Image (cartoon, rainbow, N blue to C red):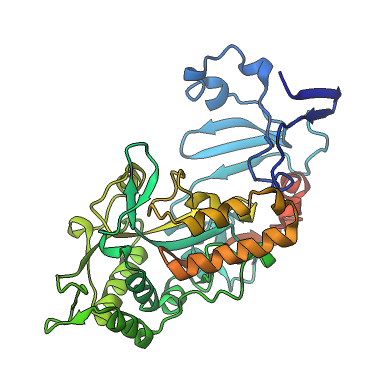
Amino acid sequence: MSGLEEKDDKTLVIHFKKMKPTMTTTGSGYILESAEPYHYLKNVAMKDLVASDKLRKKPLFYGPFKIKKLVQGESIEWVPNTYYYKKPHIAKIIVETIDNSKAVAAIKAGKFDVMLAQSPQIYNALKKDKDLVQLGKKTYYYSYMGFRVGKLDKDGNNVMDKHTPSSDRALRQAMAYAMNVEQVTKKFSSGLSYRANTVVPDVFGKWNAKEVKGYKLDMKKAKKLLDDAGYKLQKDGYRTKPNGKKLTLTLMADDSSKSQEETIKNYIQQWKELGVHVKLLNGRFQEFNTMVEKLSSGSTDYDLWFGAWGVTPEPTDIANSYTVTSAYNNGHFVTKENTELINSLKSDKAFDEKYRLKQFHKWQAYMDKEAFVVPIAFTHDTISVTKHVKNMSLDPNKDNDLWVDVALTK
């Protein structure tokens, strides 16, 4: 294969025609960081790969454990992989799915040693248990409110549309200032989530532009923005557009949880106080997959939506989601300045980290000003661990060898 050089049994040299500034960061996607067993899969046609038993039931592994038994949707039993370079301390690991309503009682009764992917409610119920240790870390994640300010053209590219109700920056900013995010996160996240200042999670340290403050609740400022922009308050408590026509925005949000629904209803009430009439698409919350389909297909029957992204460990790649051609630019925001800032992050000059950092902070400030995507919250992941478990860590530097080092004392 062109560009690949096998130097010895353990070294592969990859030759590139063009280098990118972020190639040295894991997760950037420029260098393949996983391997598949060619000898095992070479006779499986690509169209049959996803459904193949070689992937579904009997996959090969190069990690410390391999699957011994799989019960679809219920449990997986893992046993040591004899080909791994280190011997695990545990003879087997059984991973089970459990309903949230039963999770707290199950770990307190000793059925589990580790509780992964626990909700804020489970964390809140277990955090004071003296027989458990809570581990947590900031995540590569942000939730947000997005505005549809454009559409897809005939070639599938993103273009702006000045006729959309949410194309007015003053309106977007005002609606962001009217949101009581800190109050909401305090009520529903058990302290695990907190207001985001940009779309770059602060887990990235210096790459998050701390000088950008984001949108903290300021109803007075929100109302002044609309007053100055010509949105007149009428007798019914709602505002009209600067041209005198009725203003109604259609919101799309999913029905993922009761707290999600309560949160959205709260924000609609906040906007009512601002004088902006916001209604749910078709008068109801949407099923998640339906919502994803609308976002990706270029549907135009909504004006704003709520969503969340898990992002790569390479921070500047976050900007790539907001380009002219990106399928993830669901609001279809496109300007010359935005394009120039994003391109600067991938330019030859960006090999200088100081330059790339400076440009990335500029881009975050620009995103904040335009408010077509309003960051809402960053969050933590937590797990509960019994005191029988040793060497469990959420340090990303220990990810590769985590389960080979974990041990039990009972």
Q: Nearer the viewer, residue 286 or 219?
A: 219
Residue drawn at x 70%, y 53% as measured from the top left = 350
Q: Residue at x 79, y 33 (%)?
A: 84
Residue 311's place in the image compared with 188, above or below, is above
From the viewer's perspective, is 360 left or right of 410?
Answer: left
Work out which residue is located at the far front of the displayed protein and give it: 336
What percent of the width, then of the height, locates residue 323? Answer: 48, 49
On the image, the x and y values in percent for residue 190 come to 49, 72
In the rendered view, tell whether residue 128 sits above or below residue 357.
Answer: below
Q: Is residue 253 left or right of residue 387?
A: left
Residue 4 vs residue 33, the one in the foreground? 4
- Quadrant where the N terminus sits is top right
Give the camera-side residue of 14 and 260: 14
Residue 70 in the image: above or below residue 175: above
x and y percent of residue 74 in the render? 48, 40
> Image check: 217 left or right of 355?
left
Count of numbered labels shown in the rendering: 0
Looking at the image, residue 209 sits to the left or right of residue 309; the answer is right
Q: Quadrant of residue 401?
A: top right
Give the residue furthest to the right: 8
| Any part of residue 2 in sight | yes
Query: Is 51 or 410 nearer to us in this picture?
Result: 51
Residue at horizontal 63 percent and vertical 53 percent from the top: 345
The residue lying furthest to the top in this view is 43
In percent of width and height, residue 15 lies at: 76, 30
> Can residue 57 be seen by looking at this rendering?
no
The residue sitting at the bottom extreme is: 220
